[in-house]
Amino acid sequence: MWSQVYDPFSSMAISTAVAALPIVVLLGSIGIFEVRAHLAAILGLLTALAVAVFAYGMPPQMAALAAAYGAAFGLLPIGWIILNVIFLYQLTSTKGDFAVLQRSIASISDDKRLQLLFIAFSLGAFFEGAAGFGTPVAVTAAMLIGLGFTPLAASGLSLIANTAPVAFGALGTPIIALAAVTGLDLYELSGMVGRQLPFFSVLVPFWLVTAFVGWRRMIEVWPPILVAGVTFAIPQYLVSNFHGPWLVDIVAAVVSMASLALFLRVWRPRVPMTRVDGEPHGSSFDAVAASADTPQTVRRAWMPWVILSLFVFMWGTPQIRALLDGLFALKLPVPGLNDLVLKVPPVVATPRIEPAIFNFNILSATGTGILLSALLAGLLLGYGVRGLARAYAHTLYLVRFSLLTISCMLAIGFVTRYAGTDATLGLAFAATGPLYPLFGTLIGWLGVTLTGSDTSSNVLFGGLQRVTAEQLGLNPVLMAAANSSGGVMGKMLDAQSIVVASTATRWYGHEGTILRFVAFHSIALAVLVGLLVLGQAYLWPLTLLAP
């Protein structure tokens, strides 16, 4: 048994600076020195291992096993999702059906701002609610690049849009995990998050379009932006407070998509924006080609994505997951690491042994549902078995560096988790006294930036949030919820999501450019969430939003 130490240098300032080194190396290599993502991830991993072993005293074998455990988690479930989403995209693109899909979406509106709103925000929220773990960014970024958006715009804007739905992603998994690690009531946590994020569900669509075209061009289309945001926010509030966390994003996304599509049947911008600066020549809406698209070809183009949605939704339901896990699932304890790391106060109320069990649930993994949907769609599109095999091999070649990068990213997150260096960073924020509601929210943001997952951030810092809140006389439900709500804004900045976006847009090697594009938006929105939580903590009227 090895016990974590959170201040190995007997100086929180020095310990915090050392604990931050892996993040500085990783993000600095990508964002400042333009090092390719997989090389930056390897450098970050080596730094994390060195800090864990030489500064925090973690046994070298344990540190190596934590890295291997994280790398395996990077491949399943996350890399498995990305590989199979890109496989489906390749199948539809090669046959020309993706071009028909683009024209079909453009027929809803030929305005690029509204296409962005429909795809990145409303449709992306559906995939976040059904699957999470990189699925929405992979799908929406691929769609946007096909509609003529530049790789930077498609990548960065998909990341910005994938914020407000994240806390309830994958059928409420982050909130369920938060309740499990904190011991707080699931419905109270769901309701509190549902009273924080609807403000941002209205704000984010405006922010998204402003980031795309600026304030003046955004104002030209404010009515549909408001429709998309409000019709998402209201169901988000109602379902989270009166039903629970499971179907929040699914219901809100469907209502938002339907409302926006209906509104655009009767409303058109005065000056449509049919092209954007930097758009590749010939990629704008082709009216001649669209007029030749028959209802049959349009249905054929939508068919793979409808199948994908159905499979993703089925694979996300607990009953089907349980059935598939009953057929085959292996719980593999990591020897030499499982139940051998002790997390101690003040990060947790009482000492707690950290498990390390790899869940090899290949049948119930979301990526498997996506693969089956892609294979079925491929057969319906006219591919043979050999054609599908060749396309899959080509896809595997395309994403090889992305898979390596994601494995290394998750390895960094797991090393910092088991070494306790992430807890050192969290404790540094926790020492802020009356301003803790603001900085506690930023702990959630930091957790997602480190791990790439709101679920992982909640598992990582949920206990710390409750303990600190009780010590400071704050509402523990408020601060635990703030961890999840603040974490959603870190989703666009975590290196794993950036790699997913660069892969989906076939812009691998430009992760530094994407990171710089989203950095301000991530930090600014996280601070705004923190200010809201600060108001909920100290201003009585804001707490009256409870039903």
Image (spheres, rainbow, N blue to C red):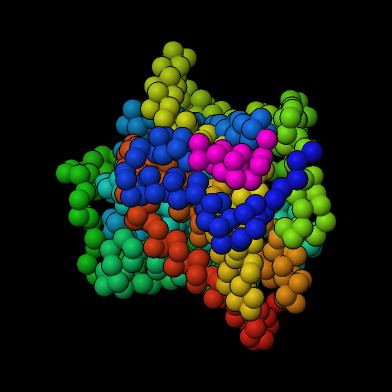
Residue depicted at x 74% and y 65%: 466
The residue lying toward the viewer, choosing from 456 and 203, is 456
Residue depicted at x 40% and y 34%: 39
Q: Is residue 426 visible?
A: no
Q: Position of residue 6 (x, y in %)?
A: 67, 54
Instruction: Tell me the chief SS of the magenta region.
Output: helix
Where's the C terminus, which quadrant?
A: bottom right
Most extreme residue toward the top is: 386
- When the figure is inspected, residue 401 is found, relative to residue 394, above or below; the finding is below
Most extreme residue toward the left is: 281
What stretch of residues is rendered in magenta? 46-59
Residue depicted at x 69% and y 64%: 465
Let me know if residue 51 is in the magenta part.
Answer: yes
In the displayed structure, does residue 393 sit left or right of residue 10?
left
In the displayed structure, does residue 327 sit left or right of residue 203?
right
- When the figure is inspected, residue 51 is found, relative to residue 197, above or below; the finding is above
The residue lying toward the viewer, choosing from 532 and 256, is 532
Let me know if residue 194 is in the magenta part.
Answer: no
Q: Quadrant of residue 337?
A: top right
The residue lying toward the viewer, choosing from 426 and 257, is 426
Q: Position of residue 492 (x, y in %)?
A: 46, 54
Q: Is residue 2 visible?
A: yes
Residue depicted at x 67% and y 86%: 540
Where's the N terminus, which quadrant?
A: top right
Most extreme residue toward the front is: 10
Q: Position of residue 203 (x, y in %)?
A: 46, 70
Q: Quadrant of residue 251?
A: bottom right
In the displayed structure, does residue 211 sit left or right of residue 174?
left
In the displayed structure, does residue 409 sit left or right of residue 433?
left
In this rendering, the count of numbered labels is: 0
- When the figure is inspected, residue 23 is found, relative to residue 530, above or below; the finding is above
Q: Position of residue 86 (x, y in %)?
A: 43, 33
